């Protein structure tokens, strides 16, 4: 098994192993620097266990915040290298500087910090280069068979080809007759002894991707063979479970009401809600105090460019469909919706002012929503709230759309991390797959991970219209 679940959220074991190995490298960086300085007859750096732990923790968090691991597999070495520099040299160093101002005993000196970061960057890049080759190795990948060669199997094949480098799995083949949905070389006949075939070919999982489970593309469904495989240690999964685990989303084309009812997610927890509410209150109040001076400059810039008001409100749909008033810094002209009709935002929107473009890129326009968090209308993490005018149309066009309102809307969300800014029904459909995954599996741990990774969205201006 190449994944584990932490509070219902799927995490891939290879990436966890890489993260732990990198943490060890970062933890030992000051030790390596001290040994190098002694070999060069220099005064060795003075460091402590706590300063090493702090250093490793902050730089590891920086890597996670900058999306280094997915960039490494999906965008290539150059993108990973750039994000690593930002994570270590900017985020990590900035975090260390702030902490050492508060706790001077952890200060290791600016020159020592520079050389420690250089050593960490070099060793970490070598470790990640080796990791890419190992994960891409067929010997370390989980080998999977897909039962079916129809449209559903074709859909899995397309997603697999798109994300195969970051999945850590290998689809050995698709069992069934040749279909237009799949290339001929990917299809294979169902073996006479499926269990023996799986053992001989190191198959660890069979994904059932048939529209009709009694018959498989004209052949009898191999029920007895699947039972034997299951009892013999081969994992049997549905296509929906495969999507959820490997792609961290819930595919709408496969979603059935019975799956929602009988799944192990979508559970309410008073304890979890209480912890989340306490966290929201403490962090939002602290941020509101820290960001107050910055907001005064933002208000002044908006006022000087386009006058009042510099804060505006809109009605949005909240938890369980309850409407509430959201607050944002005005980034568009006063007459952006002069006819009173709600309009989707779009790329290069002419209604956005120059100051508005800046505060949208930096997400400063969202800061007044801290008031919504304090009031309890929103949480820090959750599906982004939509306007009621759009919700009515989306609920009529997209099945299960209303179920995204089972949890509180948030300042940041799982869909915003995984899907670019969308302003259409089709975009809303794609984002819903991630929102439903969050509604099913959300936890405090997952919220913290989303908050850390949202740093990348802000710094790189991802998904801004």
Image: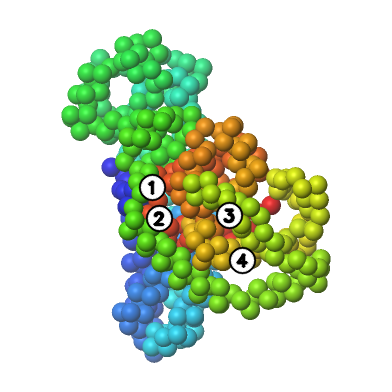
Sequence order check, earlier mark of 2 and 1: 1
Place of residue 336 in the rendered image (x, y in percent of width and height, measured from the top left): 78, 53
Instruction: Where is residue 144? Give x, y as percent.
Output: 34, 32
In this picture the colour scheme is rainbow
Task: Judge by depth and name the residue closer to the eye, 49 or 263.
Answer: 263
Asked if residue 72 can be seen in this view, the reply is: no
Q: Which residue is mark 1?
A: 441
Q: Look at the image and tell me whether residue 99 can be seen.
A: yes
Residue neighbourhood size for the residue with mark 4, other residues' Cα within 10 Å, grouped as few (<14), some (14–19), many (≥20): some
Q: Whole-percent x and y of residue 107?
A: 42, 85
Pointer 3: what residue? Answer: 324
Q: Where is 234 relative to 410, above or below?
A: above
Badge 3 density bin: few <14, some 14–19, many ≥20, Cα 10 Å: some
Q: Position of residue 11 (x, y in %)?
A: 36, 50
Mark 2 closeness class: few <14, some 14–19, many ≥20 residues within 10 Å: some
Q: Residue at x 65, y 73 (%)?
A: 295
Image quadrant holding the N terminus, namely top left
Q: CA distance from mark 4 to mark 3?
A: 14 Å
Which numbered disc, 4 or 2, marks the residue that appears first in the sequence? Answer: 4
| Residue 156 vs residue 112, the one in the foreground | 156
Q: Quadrant of residue 424?
A: top right
Mark 1 → mark 4, Cα distance in angstroms: 28 Å
Q: Considering the numbered disc 4 on the image, is that residue within a helix, a strand or a loop?
A: loop
**Residue 368 got which mark?**
4
Front: mark 1 or 4: 4
């Amino acid at each position: 098994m190449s994944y584990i679940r932490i509070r219902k959220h799927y995490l891939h074991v290879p990436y966890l192993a890489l993260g732990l190995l990198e943490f060890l490298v970062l933890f030992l960086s000051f030790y390596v620097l001290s040994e190098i300085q002694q070999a060069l007859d220099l005064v060795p750096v003075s460091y402590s266990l706590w300063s090493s732990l702090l250093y490793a923790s902050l730089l590891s968090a920086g890597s996670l915040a900058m999306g280094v691991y997915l960039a490494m597999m999906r965008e290539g070495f150059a993108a990973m290298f750039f994000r690593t520099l930002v994570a270590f040299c900017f985020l990590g160093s900035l975090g260390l500087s702030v902490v050492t101002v508060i706790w001077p005993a952890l200060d290791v000196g600016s020159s020592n910090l520079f050389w420690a970061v250089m050593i960490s960057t070099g060793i970490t890049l070598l470790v990640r280069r080796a990791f890419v080759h190992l994960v891409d190795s067929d010997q370390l990948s989980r080998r999977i068979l897909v039962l079916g060669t129809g449209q559903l199997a074709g859909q899995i094949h397309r997603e697999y080809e798109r994300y195969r480098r970051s999945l850590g799995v290998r689809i050995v083949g698709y069992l069934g007759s040749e279909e237009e949905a799949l290339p001929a070389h990917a299809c294979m006949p169902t073996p006479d002894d499926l269990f023996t075939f799986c053992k001989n070919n190191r198959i660890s999982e069979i994904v059932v991707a048939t529209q009709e489970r009694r018959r498989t593309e004209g052949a009898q469904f191999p029920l007895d063979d699947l039972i034997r495989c299951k009892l013999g240690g081969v994992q049997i999964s549905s296509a929906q479970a495969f999507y959820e685990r490997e792609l961290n989303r819930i595919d709408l084309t496969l979603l059935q009401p019975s799956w929602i009812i009988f799944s192990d997610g979508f559970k309410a927890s008073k304890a979890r809600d209480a912890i989340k509410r306490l966290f929201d209150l403490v962090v939002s109040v602290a941020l509101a105090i820290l960001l107050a001076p910055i907001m005064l400059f933002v208000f002044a810039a908006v006022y000087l460019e386009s006058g009042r008001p510099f804060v505006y409100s809109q009605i949005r749909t909240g938890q369980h469909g309850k409407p509430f008033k959201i607050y944002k810094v005005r980034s568009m002209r006063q007459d952006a919706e002069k006819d009173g009709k709600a309009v989707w935002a779009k790329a290069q929107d002419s209604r956005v002012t120059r100051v508005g473009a800046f505060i949208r890129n930096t997400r400063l326009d969202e800061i007044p929503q801290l008031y919504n968090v304090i009031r309890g209308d929103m949480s820090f993490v959750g599906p982004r709230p939509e306007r009621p005018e759009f919700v009515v149309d989306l609920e009529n066009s997209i099945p299960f759309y209303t179920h995204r309102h089972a949890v509180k809307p948030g300042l940041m969300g799982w869909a915003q991390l995984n899907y670019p800014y969308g302003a259409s029904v089709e975009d809303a459909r794609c984002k819903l797959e991630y929102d439903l995954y969050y509604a099913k599996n959300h936890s405090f741990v997952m919220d913290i991970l989303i908050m850390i990774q949202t740093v990348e969205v802000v710094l790189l201006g991802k998904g801004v219209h």
